[in-house]
Image (spheres, helix red, strand yellow):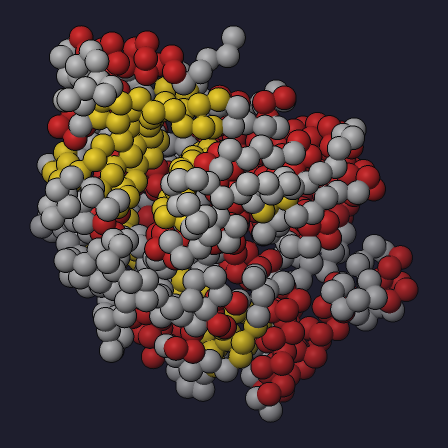
Amino acid sequence: MAITSLNFVTQQLLPALITRGILEPTGINTANVTWKSVSFNYLNRTLNLLEIDHRHWLPVIQICKEHQCRFASMWGEEESDAFVITSCFYVAKQYFLLRTYLNDKQNPRIASAANIYYAANRLERHCHDLLGIDFVNSYDWRRWTRHQAWSASEFPLRRDYPLDHVNYTSSTPADSDYPFLTSSNLDLYHIPVGPVHAGIIEPGHFRFHAAGEDIVYLEERLGYLHKGIEKIATTRTAATLLSLAARVSGDGTVAHSWAAAMALENALCLKIPRSASLIRAILCERERVTNHLWDVAALCGDVAFTFGYYQLGRLREMWVRTNAAIFQHRLMMDVIVLGGVKIDLRIEQIASMLKEIKVLEGELKELQSIIEGNSSLNNRLCTTGVLAAAVASELGVLGFVGKASAVDFDVRRDFSYPPYDELNIAVPIAGCGDVAARFMVRWHEIFSSLQILSQLLELLANLDSRAIVVERIGLLPNSKVSGVGIVEGWRGEIITYVSIDEQGNVVRFFPRDPSWFNWLALEKLIYHDIVPDFPVCNKSVNGSYAGCDL
Amino acid sequence: MLKIIKKIFKTGIITADTTVTRRAAVAIGVDCGNDSYSDYEFTLLGNTCHQLIQANFGGSFAIRHVDAGSCNGCELGLHALNNVFYNLERFGVHFVASPRHADALLVTGVVARHMEAALRITYINTPQPKLVIAVGNCAVSGGEFGENYASCGQVSNVIPVDLNIHGCPPTPHALLTGITRLLKGRI
């Protein structure tokens, strides 16, 4: 029985809110509008968007929490007469959105949801830094995305702030007065690391408080890679947005461009051809396999198991070369376009990919017995960096980080989208939440992806119609439209929101990378581990820096 | 341990060896395509690079990588240079942990304004003689992001650049070609 997103909102949330006197029974088109229900086109169904008065924001979110809703995303927008806050929740195999309007544009304020949903904090701070909305009574009021490129009274995502606003004549100073948590305990010392790190890696700052070798506290500071992507998006059209979306996080280029394309296609009510959705999934699963292979290789490398590092790195390189041969790009960037994909697959390419899957399965089975039996590898990875299931669930952790801590969620299975809605998705789950669990969950996800890929390739080979991109009829909307795209990227659930005006210009673009949640997990799981274990713990989470800094 | 040794021998040597003829290399499965993108060609180019490094850098060329604002795609290409197919270290090129050990800085991405200070400090702390390599379309010419309130744009807007390597991201072949060209120019 198909469960539509209407069920939770109309059958549980609204009755609860009305019972408690938070919302009036008739909220639509009355003089005192306290709520309005809007349908959001989403593939072959609708998402429910509940517009509520900003005074009801916190009580409604509290009820969502009591009903075990997972907080999934939040973003702000500016309209001519109000600021708009939208948040996205997931419960019982459905998503729904809450939206509120802040009409006082001189002083936009709303209650912070962070005391109810801990993970909302960074998204709220990002929203404040870019749009100037005050989230009142938050547990952490410090700037997040803003370092020293703009001042506390400037808000770059606002309409009156130009994209190329350059207010500096000398170089941007370092963010040296950021109020990190400090300790006056003389037994603790602080280790600041970054933004430039020892290896080939993205920049970010980690500040440890350590007692001897034990880490007592870790504070992250990101935002070093902020390039103004959300503002740049306002200069793009629906067609030209995807090259920007593809570069939100280069290692997740397929997943991010798919989420953005899906959001645009939902906004424009475009249905893409079946072969295009099969090819998009083939790209996405290939991206998952190559990234997981590289991650397990690097995890071996971080504990000096160089045999594993080079063997798994070899397997990754072989797959990336196939990407280059078939999709003309090692990372398969820019293959997904609005309305479909750019490249079709020939029958002999499908056959060679099927063979490649068999080869990889054989290689991994050989390596698996070596890896599982290696005692020094077990010694380093087991019981290291434990993320308790309760913490993972409370934070709303996603992807393999969540799955390794018993968070049994995968968008491909639980809120399925074409072509995954035709397939059985095997989701590996572990309970212990240590680095070894995050290693093995990735390992089994590779096998799961290889099975999915085999099925996708067979389906594609047997398909009659080979249209790979939609016929562009009536592409421009009559009015401003918005859409949401939700995909299971290789790191986890991506939720992307786009809004387009009548000329097809992008008004708002917000890609919510899963790392917004998974970075928080790193601060928790490192507690009581030793400093030398930080690299392997960090790699076991492998949050995207660029994907969050935008 | 026995399983590891067995697997090592079963896998064999992946890195292309140009001391054997091309025909012999093909026979043992080395990628020797005629175009310039094969592993055999990569090794030939790398041999040239190695000779230049031995002649002018005492056998070792140290690179400090800095991500000043990349999307992280370029980093994957850099990591690939040290896998068994490309094996950049055999030519004497090493990625080092400190700018003070470096002969060259290799910068990826536009220079995000929030990384500008860190990039400048890294550059200042690299001892002379030093080179700067801008890797990827963003680092070379601003790429997808360009200059804006958050981005200084291409690397040469912030520090002097000696070599540009285009690509989004550049392939390992493009990276080695660029590095070799830079080393040739320094003679």
Asked whether residue B162 is in view, the answer is yes
Q: Residue at x 73, y 69 (%)?
A: B43
Against A515, residue B105 (above or below) is below
**Residue A538 x %, y %:** 40, 45
Q: Residue at x 78, y 30 (%)?
A: A464
* Position above or below: B29 against A35: below
Q: Considering depth in this image, is A32 or B19 the residue closer to the camera? A: A32
- Asked if A520 appears above or below A227 in the picture, the reply is above
Position of B168 with respect to A140 (left or right) is: right
Q: Nearer the viewer, residue B174 or A375?
A: B174
Quadrant of residue B186 in the image? bottom right
Image point (43%, 72%), residue name: B154
Left or right for A338, reference B154: right
In the rendering, at what x and y percent does residue A145 appear? 27, 53
Residue A486, position as x, y percentages in the image = 46, 33
Q: Quadrant of residue A350?
A: top right
Residue at the image point whose x is 45% and y is 64% from the top:
B109
